[in-house]
Amino acid sequence: MTSLEEARELLREFPVVDGHNDLPWALRQQVRYDLDARDIATDQVAHLHTDIPRLREGGVGAQYWSVYVRSDYAGDKAVSATLEQIDCVRQLLARYPADLRPALTAADMEAARAEGRIASLIGAEGGHSIAGSLATLRALYALGVRYMTLTHNDNIAWADSATDEPGVGGLSAFGREVVREMNRVGMLVDLSHVAATTMRDALDTTSAPVIFSHSSSRTVCDHPRNIPDDVLERIPGNGGVAMVTFVPKFVLRAAADWTAEADANMRAHGFHHLDTTAEAMKVHRAFEETTPRPVATVSTVADHLDHMREVAGIDHLGIGGDYDGTAFTPDGLNDVSGYPNLLAELLDRGWSKPDLAKLTWKNAVRVLGAAEDAARDLQATRGPSNATIEELDG
């Protein structure tokens, strides 16, 4: 049996829990949520990284669908757009019930696995989505959001982003209250995208495990979106999970340098640098023709996992591909069908099948269950927080 055949066999029992997929935003950008125009029950390779046949081929058993909205959205605009994204996920679940199963808990994830359906969870990408309101945070939880990334690419009033200038120096007093309230309701604190200072403040504050829904190793690729070793070293004590991402500019230094030039070219042509519409991608492809793109591979991603395992341990790793949220992907991990290639590479590097089962399924399910347990304990001792940013941060 080849390594790839072994990988596929393992995924039939312990499928991938992927921490981050931006399909809802891609559907918003491309067709304004017209699901007839992007029927993911059929081959969408010309338009998307994601469709149900490729999820099945890739051995995906649970997916956190990102309800991302751009970080230049603010206030009510950000909240409304987040609600529209949640509605998109709900439309997908209603349209494809034979393949996608709503999941709110670790038990729901296991039930979906037993049924052979893909557990579908929701993650909000960026604290701007709550517009400074803990009540809005609780409303998102009630609507099914099970993690929130504290920032996206820009600072918010109460937390610093990895890709912005220092603002409050990590988390403000209100930011720490957001973390405590997330713990209390059972929403996972996601530390992808945040500054290292924010990571450390969150770990100092939280009483539940955290996740990094789509981040890789800063030692292997020195990019501010990645996790420093001192933070990785703290994850075992916290019980959390770091989910390696595939985005080339986060896993390969040469790709990061190329992307900075490509992003500048996009802006010069009047596009947001994260735009992946057909028109924007034409600009990207034209740039790529004159300035060849450094290509990451399956091996590049495996290098990150090898290092993260050495620092954090096998019990604290997962996968968060960021499909449909990136213009480019590594060779061999071109779309959601590619996960078996990564597992085959790890098998060839000596990873055991029990360790791979932790990477793909067990760790991510455990961390959501631990957040539920922590919330149950906290709710027995305190009620909802009605603190405001004005009260706590002045």
Image (cartoon, rainbow, N blue to C red):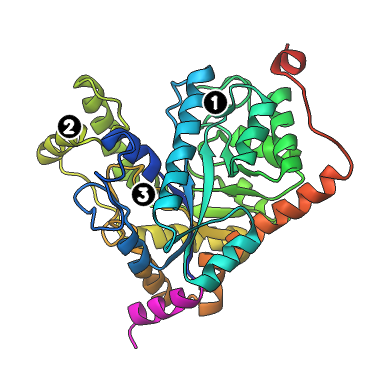
The span shown in magenta is 1-14
Task: Judge the density around disc 2: few (<14), some (14-19), many (≥20) Cα neighbours within 10 Å.
Answer: few
Residue that appears at 77% across and 50% down: 374
Q: Secondary structure at mark 2?
A: helix
Q: Is residue 365 left or right of residue 388?
A: left
Q: Secondary structure at mark 3?
A: loop
Which of the two residues, 374 or 353, is positioned nearer the viewer here?
374
Mark 3 and mark 2 residues within 8 Å of each other at the beta carbon = no
Mark 3 to mark 1 CA distance (whole Å): 22 Å
**Horizontal relation, residue 354 to residue 1: left or right:** right
Q: Residue 200 falls in which quadrant of the image?
A: top right
Which residue position is annotated with label 3? 323
Question: Please, what is the three-letter code of the amino acid marked with disc 1?
Answer: His
The reply to whether callout 3 and callout 1 are in contact (CB within 8 Å) is no
Q: Residue furthest bottom?
A: 1
Q: Quadrant of the N terminus?
A: bottom left
Q: Earlier in the sequence, mark 1 or mark 2?
A: 1
Q: Measure the alpha-carbon separation of dots 1 and 2.
A: 28 Å
* Secondary structure predominantly adopted by residues drawn in magenta: helix
Reading the image, the residue beneath label 2 is 279
How many neighbours does mark 3 have within 10 angstroms: few (below 14), some (14-19), or many (20 or more)? many
Q: Is residue 325 above or below residue 306?
A: above
- Residue drawn at 43 percent across, 21 percent down: 72
Query: Residue at 61% of width from left, 26% of height from top?
Result: 159
Residue 375 image point, x, y percent? 77, 47
Q: Amino acid at mark 3?
A: Tyr
Q: Position of residue 106 (x, y in %)?
A: 64, 60
**What is the x, y in percent for residue 294?**
23, 47
